[in-house]
Each structure stands twice: as C-alpha cells, then as structure tokens.
Image (cartoon, rainbow, N blue to C red):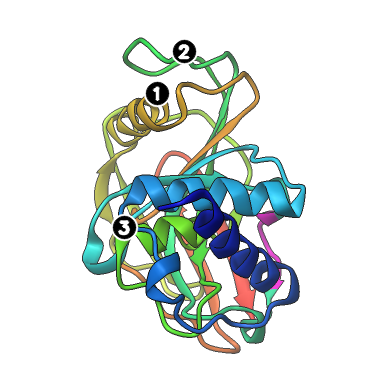
Amino acid sequence: MQDAARQQAAACLAEAFETGNPLAALPDDLMPASPAEGGDVAALVLEQLGLVACGIRLAHGPDGKGPLAGPMLEARLLPGGVCLPLAALRHAQATAALVAVLAEALPEHGEGLPALAAVHPAIDVAGSRFRDSPASLGLFAADLCGLGHVVAGRGGELPDGAVAVTLAEARRRPRGEPVDLRAVLAAAMDAARRCAGGLPAGAVVVVTGLSRPVVPEAGLSLAASFAGLGRVKLDFA
C-alpha cells in the first residue's frame, strides 16, 4: 500500500470519525491488504485528528478472527451509568470487557502481568465508521478495530482463578460463564508487547469479548457482572 493511498484512506476515516457520517466501501486501491497495513492507516487517522491513544483495546474482527490490538482513546472511556444514543452507533455490539490501568511501564520484552493500578469491570460497545461492517481484518484494523465506547465501573482487585462473567439486561441475574481474568490479562499484555512495543505507566489495556455479544436496542438497560470484582451498567436511548 503506497503512502498516498494510506493517507487518503486515513483522511476518509478521519472525516467519518469527526462528522459521524458513514463511509461507503473504500475503493480497491485504498483497501488495506493486511492487519498491519490497516494498523498503519489507523495510526494516520489519529494523527490527522490530532488524537493520542491512551492505551490499547483488543477486539475480535470479522467472523471472530483475531484478536487485534487497536488504539484506545480517553474520550471513548466512559463511567458506568451513562446513556448512549444508538443513533450515533453503527453496527453496535456490546460485550463484557475488562479495563486494566498499568501502575508501571510494560517493557517490550518480558512476560507475565505487570503491576496494575486498577482493574475495572466494563462493557465494550463496538461500532464502525462504515455503512457496511468491515469484511476483512485489514479494514477492521483501519476502522480502529471497531472502537465505539468503553463503559467502566468502579475499580477493584484482580480476582484469582476463574470467575463468573455475565452480560444481560440489568434486571436479570443469569448464571455467568467462567473466565480466568488473570490469564486473559496476561495474554493481553503479551499482545501489547508484540503489537505496541510495550506501554508506559498509566496506560490502559482493554480486553473485549468476555461474553456473548448483545445487539443493543433503544430502551435497553445492560449490566456486566464480574464475580469478585464488581458490576457496571449502561442504558441505550
């Protein structure tokens, strides 16, 4: 992918991000051929918008492929209890998620979990800048890996072992699926080392897809519960 093509593809995505107007499919000559090319386009999108990532967000692409590491933006990290208007979200899909804040820098070379300042239960609401959902991993990466909003609850300590995780209507309390959050975060840190070359202290790592996805509807109150960690809720209008 030539530099001029990357710049043009990024300009299209940056305009869609800024205006909220959906993009039609990119022409073939502007289409990223791989996740790496898509990541380069995503970096240019942030550069053209004057935005700086506060960390990374891991998300699965089309047909569950991945996960890929995309940028996380501070303005897209919201407190629990907010109400999100569905009109501003295309192809919205919610999953239980985890937000970890690094207490120390994550070096490029190493293994295991670094010291964490906080871990938060969260709900990831993925979205897209495109009229039709990206069908390739390269385009998904260019589309900021489907970054929409991440709604985080009160922080707590990371539980040991597998804990029950649920995502459902707030009034329901179904039985959760067991998830080993330490293993999930350890894998996320390895991805951060590999894809981002490490992260500074204070950066956030968001892991999405910790539950079956829910397609939100207007009026839905959704809650994610993590046994031993906490609960977070949001509403859709």
Please tell me whether residue 39 belongs to the stretch shown in magenta: no
User: Do residues under tags 1 and 2 come within 8 Å of each other at their CB atoms?
Assistant: yes
Tell me the number on the disc at residue 107. 2
- Within 10 angstroms of label 3, few (less than 14), some, or many (20 or more) residues? some
Q: Where is residue 103? Give x, y as percent.
A: 60, 17
Mark found first going from the N terminus, 1 or 2: 2
Mark found first going from the N terminus, 1 or 3: 3
Q: Is residue 16 above or below residue 11?
A: below
Q: Is residue 191 left or right of residue 101?
A: left
Query: Which residue matches tag 3?
Result: 33
Q: Is residue 75 left or right of residue 193?
A: right
- Residue 102 occupies quadrant: top right
Query: Which residue matches tag 1?
Result: 193
Which residue is at a point 39% across and 27% down the rendered structure image?
189
Residue kind at label 3, given as amino acid type: Ala
Check disc 2 and report its element: helix, strand or loop. Answer: loop
Q: Is residue 92 above or below residue 75?
A: below
- Within 10 angstroms of label 2, few (less than 14), some, or many (20 or more) residues? some
Which residue is at a point 51% across and 72% down the rendered structure image?
128
